[in-house]
Image (spheres, rainbow, N blue to C red):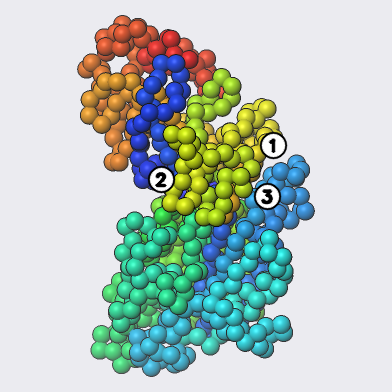
């Protein structure tokens, strides 16, 4: 498979490592030499909710594009509700053809906003409501001119496959709302509409700790906790899909829209957004910062615009966009069709970036693509698709692929050490929703402390049973008994987790899925030796690829030392340790009784380092198992 998902899982989980920190405590020994352990909690809550926002351009050139979008809703809803990604009727785990399938979405919200945000109070042709336009408020208007559509709908539509509701009826309702018509303002403020729709006026349980509420035209706030309340939820995948044939014109200075403006009046009204972008439009950083702070983990954010990029610049399936060709600052590198320049044949517009005969033209969406580029760098799931095609099937397939990558089991940033019996020295702990008990989750038992079950508030805390696979050969089947397992061997895991030369892919997966609303933690234990100086000591978690510690802020193992010997990042234990060449190096560091293990890494840990003949060369206690 060529598919390699975005890097969202790695930075998101590394952020979680920092957030939870390392908790020194008494714990169950991981080998006979250990009586002190470090517990490291990694948030691995299973994600099964999706909040899907469509920003649909409702200007007068979008009739065919809205029809193409509506035509794909039944298929999209069917795939999300069933998990049958390849639509072969064979679901994940049910047969050899289901490798690309995934656990279905259990709870789906769909909302629609338009690009019409008014014109700063100035009267402009095509813009009927000059003050705020549609203002980023989720649409409730239906289309009674379309058979089967009602006049009004809730502010967002919700679908739960296990409710017995019809997926086709739900898809029809989404189409009724998303077919917005073409009576909207010709000044499209796509990014501003999205940000206002999704931003609350104050921090919530689902925003990042650093959330700062943005303000909008006339010092108003976003609608996420007022008009659009309930659409964005805790621990959901928030997927944003702008569908537009124009560049973004999110104005910082409303004077831009004044036909008689002394500042901008010399420029044709149709070219002002292009000619005065630096002076009059909001900077890209407003939308990057504003969107990324809507999730506590960047991997729960997806930004997937369907915009005016040339069809041949659409990235291959599962791959990252070619941002150099799309938005490079260097004209020699950027594709000529993505250059914003006045059309000499029609001086009141820019040169189109793509054209579909019979459907119209689209223009370079440079600002929107740059938002995508920066969000992807921060760990969000991103794809950029083209509006210049009659069918949106390929575009929606790639968007579903992004959602698929954000659901289900959690990829991990570091390999866990296997014990002799095939287990890892970790516990998966589930904090159940209120009103549920551990008996409601197969393979779970109450967590006990001092002879009593542990609760967090009124929520019972459960320990899930760890299951061991029969084989860890790639492509082997997962265990079937209820609980969880450490996955380094399934084809699905290989496709959905990032890998590198130094850290192969790995994840936590479930044979019995925790219920929606449960908070699930992976608590791992690693031996710690006394000694060391400063915050970096033997046993501090580290990344073998860089030597950096998983502390806040990151440091380097070499900043710690024992007996004057600088530490290094032990690739087997993924923790700072004492490097060596001979046994005397260990004694010189004050590690009495330790020896230098110079065996090839493939002998030290054949599962983790198959075929790697590099000498291990770290001090070890020979009496430890």
Can residue 605 be seen here? The reply is yes
How far across and how far down the image is residue 9, in percent? 48, 46
Tell which of 363 and 585 is nearer to you.
585
Q: Residue at (47%, 85%) from the top-left corner?
A: 185
- Distance between the alpha carbons at the discs numbered 1 and 3: 18 Å
On residue 480, which mark appears?
Answer: 1
Which of pointers 3 and 2 lies earlier in the amino acid sequence?
2
How far across and how far down the image is residue 593, in percent? 35, 7
> How many neighbours does mark 1 have within 10 angstroms: few (below 14), some (14-19), or many (20 or more)?
some
The reply to whether discs 1 and 2 touch (Cβ–Cβ < 8 Å) is: no
Q: Quadrant of the N terminus?
A: top right
Can residue 327 be seen here? The reply is no
- Side (left or right) of 365 relative to 610: left
Tell which of 566 and 277 is nearer to you.
566
Q: Residue at (77%, 53%) from the top-left corner?
A: 89
> How many neighbours does mark 2 have within 10 angstroms: few (below 14), some (14-19), or many (20 or more)?
some
- Distance between the alpha carbons at the discs numbered 1 and 2: 29 Å
Q: Residue at (41%, 55%) from the top-left corner?
A: 296
On residue 16, which mark appears?
Answer: 2
| Dot in front, 1 or 2 | 1
Please name the residue that numbered disc 3 is placed on: 101
How far across and how far down the image is residue 106, in percent? 62, 58
- Distance between the alpha carbons at the discs numbered 3 and 2: 27 Å
How far across and how far down the image is residue 85, in percent? 68, 54
Which of pointers 1 and 3 lies earlier in the amino acid sequence?
3
Q: Report helix, strand or loop for mark 2.
A: helix
Q: Report helix, strand or loop for mark 3.
A: loop
Tell which of 221 and 273 is nearer to you.
221
| Dot in front, 1 or 3 | 1
């Amino acid at each position: 498979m060529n598919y390699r998902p975005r890097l969202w899982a790695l930075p998101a989980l590394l952020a979680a490592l920092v957030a939870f920190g390392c908790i020194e405590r008494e714990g169950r020994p991981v080998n006979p030499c250990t009586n002190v352990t470090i517990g490291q909690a990694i948030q691995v809550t299973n994600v099964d909710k999706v909040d899907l926002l469509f920003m649909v351009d409702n200007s007068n050139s979008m009739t065919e594009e809205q029809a193409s979008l509506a035509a794909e809703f039944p298929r999209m809803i069917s795939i999300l509700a069933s998990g049958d990604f390849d639509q072969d009727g064979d679901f994940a785990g049910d047969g050899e053809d289901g490798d690309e399938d995934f656990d279905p979405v259990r709870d789906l919200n769909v909302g629609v906003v338009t690009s019409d945000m008014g014109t700063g109070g100035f009267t402009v042709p095509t813009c009927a409501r000059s003050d705020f336009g549609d203002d980023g408020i989720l649409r409730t208007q239906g289309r009674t001119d379309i058979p089967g559509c009602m006049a009004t709908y809730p502010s967002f539509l919700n679908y739960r496959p296990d409710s017995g509701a019809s997926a086709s009826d739900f898809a029809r309702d989404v189409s009724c709302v998303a077919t917005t018509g073409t009576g909207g303002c010709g000044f499209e403020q796509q990014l501003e509409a999205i940000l206002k729709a999704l931003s609350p006026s104050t921090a919530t349980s689902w925003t990042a700790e650093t959330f700062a509420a943005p303000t909008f035209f006339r010092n108003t706030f976003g609608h996420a906790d007022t008009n659009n309340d309930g659409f964005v939820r805790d621990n959901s995948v928030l997927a944003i899909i702008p569908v537009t044939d124009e560049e973004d014109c999110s104005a910082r200075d409303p004077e831009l829209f004044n036909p008689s403006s002394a500042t901008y009046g010399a420029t044709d009204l149709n070219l002002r957004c292009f000619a005065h972008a630096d002076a009059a439009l909001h900077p890209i950083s407003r939308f990057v910062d504003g969107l990324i702070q809507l999730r506590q983990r960047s991997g729960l954010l997806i930004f997937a615009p369907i915009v005016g990029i040339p069809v041949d610049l659409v990235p291959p399936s599962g791959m990252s966009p070619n941002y150099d060709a799309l938005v490079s600052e260097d004209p020699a590198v950027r594709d000529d069709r993505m250059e914003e320049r006045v059309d000499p044949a029609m001086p009141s517009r820019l040169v189109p970036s793509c054209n579909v005969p019979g459907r119209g033209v689209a223009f370079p969406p440079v600002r929107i693509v740059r938002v995508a580029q920066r969000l992807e760098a921060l760990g969000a799931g991103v794809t950029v698709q083209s509006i210049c095609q009659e069918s949106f099937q390929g575009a929606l397939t790639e968007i579903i692929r992004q959602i698929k990558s954000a659901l289900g089991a959690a990829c991990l940033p570091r390999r866990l050490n296997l014990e002799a019996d095939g287990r890892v020295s970790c516990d998966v702990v589930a904090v159940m929703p209120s009103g549920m008990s551990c008996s409601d989750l197969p393979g779970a038992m109450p967590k006990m402390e001092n002879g009593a079950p542990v609760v967090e508030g009124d929520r019972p805390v459960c320990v899930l049973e760890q299951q061991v696979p029969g084989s860890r050969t790639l492509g082997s089947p997962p265990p079937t008994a209820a609980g969880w397992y450490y996955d380094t061997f399934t084809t699905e895991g290989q496709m959905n987790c990032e890998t590198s030369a130094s850290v192969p892919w790995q994840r936590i997966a479930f044979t019995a899925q925790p219920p929606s609303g449960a908070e699930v933690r992976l608590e791992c234990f690693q031996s710690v030796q006394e000694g060391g100086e400063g915050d970096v000591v033997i046993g501090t978690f580290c990344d073998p690829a860089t030597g950096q510690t998983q502390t806040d802020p990151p440091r380097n193992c070499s900043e710690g030392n024992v007996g004057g010997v600088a530490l290094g990042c032990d690739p087997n234990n993924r923790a700072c340790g004492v490097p060596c060449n001979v046994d005397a190096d260990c004694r010189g560091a004050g590690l009495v009784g330790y020896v230098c293990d110079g065996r090839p890494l493939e002998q030290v840990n054949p599962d983790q380092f198959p075929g790697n003949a590099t000498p291990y060369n770290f001090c070890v206690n020979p009496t430890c198992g």
